[in-house]
Image (cartoon, rainbow, N blue to C red):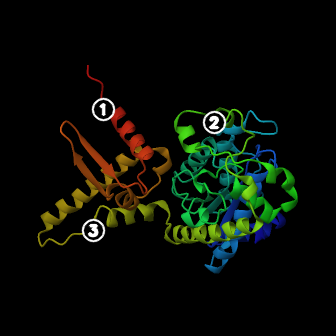
Amino acid sequence: MIRLAERTYEEAARLARDPKSVVVFPLGAIEEHGPHLPLLVDWLGAEELARVIAPYLRRAGWRPVLVPSMPYGASPLAEDWSGTVSLSTGTLRRVVGEIIRGLARHGFRRFVLTNYQADPGHLRAMALIKRSAERRGRMQVLFAGFAPDHSNAAMVNPRITALCRSPRPDREWHSGELETAMVLAVRPGLVRRALARRLPPAWIDVKRALAAGRTTFRKMNPKGRGYFGWPAAARAGTGRAALKLRARLISQDLISELQTWRPAAEQWIKEGKEAAHGTRLSCHCFRANEVRLLLGVIAYNLGTLLRRLALPLTIQSWSLTSLQQRLFKTGGRLIRHARYFVLQLAERHLTQRLFGQILGRTERLAGHPT
């Protein structure tokens, strides 16, 4: 992989002008990972993701350019544990945003942020970074690893959890089997193996705890030691297999996004043609075609208003076509009871939490009665 920091300014200028250059920027975190793992697990994981996706990008015709990683992130869940250094969401957004803008000033246009940190505060910062960078439509910012736009399928894919030896793979989260296995595969000397083998499992439903408003690891498990899952089940082979599979799944999505991205003006034209059918002018009468064109413009503007006013920040960057396919064309059924109706929706992209956020933002648009 090309390491930008090892190049001269003239070589960097040539890389920036190459339309196939993709900046790969690992974003880590320094936080507690139980008594058996070091503080740098998420930093190490982000750098490993960058390393394993680079060959796939090269084979697809892209030139991955690795920039020095960012070791610190937002870790509010673990900030009350010794050794954790947690940046505020605003600080992280500004620092990473300025690094991206500095590279874009010299010509780089495509960025992949590799991220192994799943703290909600960290993911909020990632969403703000992407939104700010892509606002003018001149840059593309993608994520490899945990992402703020609910596209974490490669990290929590059933084929990944099937690799676990743990009897409760759904509860393997922070510092559990998979993270311990990753460190065993990459830097085995950093794992306190004798201690890890003696640790009992900690089966905590982290998603439910977050939904209940428990904002730190200590509140989720007051008597715990900072891990969730069963570290004793970890094996280096599991870590290598998980990294390999994640690299393939993540790279497939990245290559597809890189190949279909266009600058803002071209993207808007494409959305008008495909999502709003702005060029479907099949009538014989000029006036009728004019009306159809105006209807397409109105539909496009309504879709844009929907994105800006009603959608959560994490999915505001979705195209109109993506919104049609992921939100509106969702399977469901209406169940009638004697006194009420129940609308059941298939949870794929439109999760219950995301649907609730959309409804909440829509309700706030209504004017208050005078």
The kind of residue tagged 3 is: Thr
CB under 8 Å between discs 2 and 3: no
Which residue is tagged 1?
Answer: 366
What amino acid type should be assigned to the residue bearing mark 2? Met
Image mark for residue 220: 2
Q: Nearer the viewer, mark 2 or mark 3?
A: 2
Label 2 Cα neighbours within 10 Å, binned few <14 / some 14-19 / many ≥20: many
Disc 3 is placed on an element classified as loop
Answer whether residue 156 is visible to the viewer in this image: yes
Indicate which label's residue lies in the foreground, 3 or 1: 1
User: Which residue does the image show at 55% across and 57% down from the upper left?
Assistant: 152
Question: Residue 279, labelled with which disc?
Answer: 3
Position of the C terminus, as image quadrant, is top left
Mark with earlier residue (2, 1): 2
Q: Quadrant of residue 31?
A: top right
Q: Label 2 vs label 1: CA separation? A: 37 Å
Report the residue at 52% width, 71% height from top: 256
Residue 148 at what x, y percent from top left?
55, 50
Q: Residue 190 carries which label?
A: none
Front-lying residue, 128 or 231: 231
Can residue 26 be seen here? The reply is no
Callout 3 touching callout 1 (CB < 8 Å): no
Image point 69% across, 34% down: which residue? Answer: 218
